[in-house]
Image (cartoon, rainbow, N blue to C red):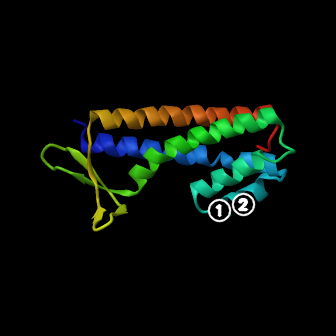
Amino acid sequence: MPQFQDILLLIGQLNYTWTNTESLLIHMIAGLARVDKETAIVIFLTLNTTRARIDLVERLSKMHRTPADCRADILDATRRLSEEAKLRNKYNHCIYSFDPDSGRGLTQLMRIVDGKDDLRYGKVEALDDQEMARIRESIKSLVAINHRFWEIVEEYDFPR
């Protein structure tokens, strides 16, 4: 069973890797919208959700002026980033609790589910070895996506 410190370090690494990779959408915006990096930063920061930023990049890539190979590369990378967003969102939007004796970690999701006749919230899940492995795999995937975005920047000569 993972200990408190191990869990916090891994969640921190997930958040760092996510933020670093999401910020590369700035270069996608700059290249696709044909603007300088500073303008792309303003656009990126004006859109205050990951979903909005990814939507913009995907829509820009689908414009007729974007070469088909560039479009395919970007859409593949943003699709992969969106897949990783699910796990990242889970760990950014939950409450953590830890048993002081065992160090066992739990998450409680901060989401309401409206049923037909009832309301449910706060699904509790264990932060066990299997879940820690999922987080490690997500971090590896994010690193690969990060490298792919940089390859796209180089290949299509997007602003750095």
Q: Mark 1: which amino acid? A: Leu
Q: Secondary structure at mark 2?
A: helix
Q: Position of residue 144 (x, y in %)?
A: 57, 31
The image quadrant where one finds the N terminus is top left
Which residue is at 32% across, 37% downward? 131
Q: Mark 2: which amino acid? A: Ile
Q: Quadrant of residue 21?
A: top right
Which residue is farthest left?
101
Figure check: 141 above or below 56: above
Q: Position of residue 141 (x, y in %)?
A: 52, 33
Q: Seen in the image, is 92 located left or right of residue 4? A: right
**Is residue 109 or residue 114 the one in the foreground?**
114
Picture disc at residue 15: none
Which residue is at 29% across, 62% downward? 120
Q: Seen in the image, is 71 located left or right of residue 52? A: right
Figure check: 58 above or below 74: below
Q: Which residue is mark 1?
A: 47
Which residue is at 76% across, 38% downward? 71
Q: Seen in the image, is 91 located left or right of residue 29? A: left
Q: Which residue is mark 2?
A: 43
Residue neighbourhood size for the residue with mark 1, other residues' Cα within 10 Å, grouped as few (<14), some (14–19), many (≥20): some
The image quadrant where one finds the C terminus is top right
Which residue is farthest front?
116
Q: Is residue 17 visible?
A: no
